[in-house]
Amino acid sequence: MKMFRDLILIAMISAGGIGGSQLPQLVQEYEQRLGGARDEVMAAHRKDVEDAGAFGLSLDDFADRYRASDDAAIRSGADNMLHRRERALGLDEALSRLTEAPYMLRPWIAFKHLDQAVGQATWQAYRPTLTIDPRFAVAGVVVAWILHAFLALLWRLLFVRQRHDRRRFDRA
């Protein structure tokens, strides 16, 4: 049983080291896609602001005029304009937090401020590379080691019976 546990430990530590070393590349690809999405939405938002400015209105006033229309298609345009503004601001904030984050915290910040569409596209296009980042590899090894220790403890608590062999010292 000990040999089996040690093999699992070796496998988990190897997977943790290799998996951890892939995180910087994944975060970099996410950052590039996030920047592209932000630029695209910002361009559309700037166009909405220019259209509102052409009539001497703010974007909110322009959207209110769209909402006052009897045509449902035009009313939905107001929601689209305001949604583009909110998305542009959200992507811009996520990108600025990611670029300003310390190197070792970037995966956490990317996960914390994850944009679902960009994150899903990044994950689908991501391909593991042979690059090894020693800092994240060590972090992956440590996390895998802790996870193994926790799982081994859980296994012992749930499935291993404690032996209560009593020694008799009163025998001669």
Image (spheres, rainbow, N blue to C red):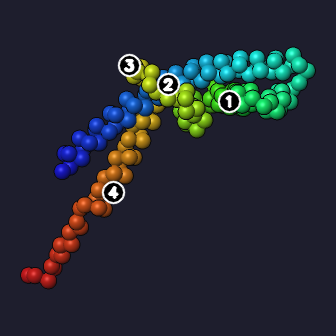
- What's under tag 1, amino acid-wise? Arg
The first of marks 3 and 1 along the sequence is 1
Residue at 60%, 24% in the rendered image: 34
Look at mark 1 in the image and give the residue it sits on: 87
The first of marks 4 and 3 along the sequence is 3
Residue at 23%, 67% in the rendered image: 162
Residue 2 appears anywhere in the view: yes
- What's under tag 3, amino acid-wise? Leu
The first of marks 2 and 4 along the sequence is 2
Q: Nearer the viewer, mark 4 or mark 1?
A: 1
Asked if labels 4 and 2 touch by Cβ distance under 8 angstroms, the answer is: no
Q: CA distance from mark 2 to mark 4?
A: 35 Å
Q: Which mark is residue 130?
A: 3
Q: Residues within 10 Å of mark 4 (few under 14, many from 20)?
A: few
Instruction: Indicate the position of residue 30 as horizontal and vertical percent values.
Output: 54, 25
Q: Which mark is residue 122?
A: 2
Q: Quick one: 172 or 16, which is closer to the camera?
A: 16
Secondary structure category for the residue under label 3: loop
Q: Nearer the viewer, mark 1 or mark 2?
A: 1
Q: Which quadrant of the view contains residue 6?
A: top left
- What's under tag 4, amino acid-wise? Leu
Asked if labels 2 and 1 touch by Cβ distance under 8 angstroms, the answer is: no
Q: Quick one: 89 or 135, which is closer to the camera?
A: 89
Look at mark 4 in the image and give the residue it sits on: 154
Secondary structure category for the residue under label 1: helix
Q: CA distance from mark 3 to mark 2?
A: 18 Å
The first of marks 4 and 1 along the sequence is 1
